[in-house]
């Protein structure tokens, strides 16, 4: 079982990259974790929003297998407190399937991606940049692993 964070477009802020890398390294002590980047579309300026979402959606769906548990990081998803997210993850991991969390492009997901998804998670009712969500999610995943192990990182 492996957890993957699949993102559309590279992270351009070097400070965010350094922090994401820090949490990726920490996560490797708990679970197999992979950070996968789908390159930004070329000539997106000449495409309609629907075509951008459709094309990005096709790339997202190519990156997962039918056996993958596909969870979208989506503003309309279920919100969790950190302990609740840890319990959610524990249930998902106990099923033994690879889990792929996806941060879509700037315009969201295509209907085909929504149709394929096994769930949606929201990190907040607030809106964050797609690049910041990568850091926030990676930290929350690390926090969930420490909660599940009973380690002192999370205080409640």
Image (cartoon, rainbow, N blue to C red):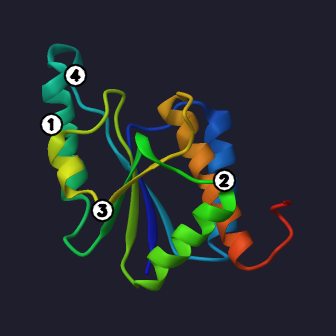
Residue shown at the point (35%, 40%) measured from the top left: 104
Q: Is the residue marked by circle 4 packed among few (<14), some (14-19), or many (20+) residues within 10 Å? A: few
Q: Is 98 rendered above or below residue 18? A: below
Frontmost residue, 23 versus 112: 112
Kindly report which numbered mark, 4 or 2, lies closer to the viewer in this rendering: 2
Relative placement, left or right, of 53 versus 96 is left
Q: Nearer the viewer, mark 4 or mark 3?
A: 3
> On the image, numbered disc 3 is attached to which residue?
118
Q: In terms of secondary structure, where does tag 3 sit?
A: loop
Q: Quadrant of residue 95?
A: bottom left
Question: 90 or 20, which is in the foreground?
Answer: 90
Q: Earlier in the sequence, mark 4 or mark 3?
A: 4
For disc 4, the marked residue is: 44
Residue at screen point 62% across, 45% down: 136
Determine which residue is flagged by label 2. 139
Q: Secondary structure at mark 4?
A: helix
Left or right relative to 82: residue 39: left
Image quadrant in which you'd find residue 107:
top left
Q: Disc 3 vs disc 1: which is toward the camera?
A: 3
Dot 2 or dot 1: first in sequence order is: 1
Residue 137: x %, y % from top left: 57, 50
Among the 4 quarters of the image, the one containing residue 132: top right
The residue that appears at 82% across and 74% down in the rendered structure is: 151
């Amino acid at each position: 079982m492996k957890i993957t964070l699949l993102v559309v477009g590279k992270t351009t802020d070097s400070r965010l990259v350094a922090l994401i890398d820090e949490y990726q390294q920490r996560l490797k002590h708990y679970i197999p974790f992979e950070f996968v980047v789908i390159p930004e579309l070329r000539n997106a300026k000449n495409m309609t929003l629907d075509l951008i979402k459709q094309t990005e959606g096709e790339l997202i769906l190519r990156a997962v297998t039918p056996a993958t548990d596909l969870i979208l990081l989506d503003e309309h998803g279920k919100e969790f407190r950190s302990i609740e997210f840890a319990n959610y993850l524990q249930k998902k991991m106990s099923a033994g399937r690879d889990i792929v969390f996806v941060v879509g492009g700037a315009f969201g997901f295509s209907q085909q991606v929504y149709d394929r998804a096994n769930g949606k998670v929201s990190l907040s009712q607030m809106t964050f940049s797609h690049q910041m969500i990568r850091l926030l999610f990676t930290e929350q995943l690390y926090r969930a692993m420490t909660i599940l192990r009973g380690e002192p990182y999370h205080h409640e």
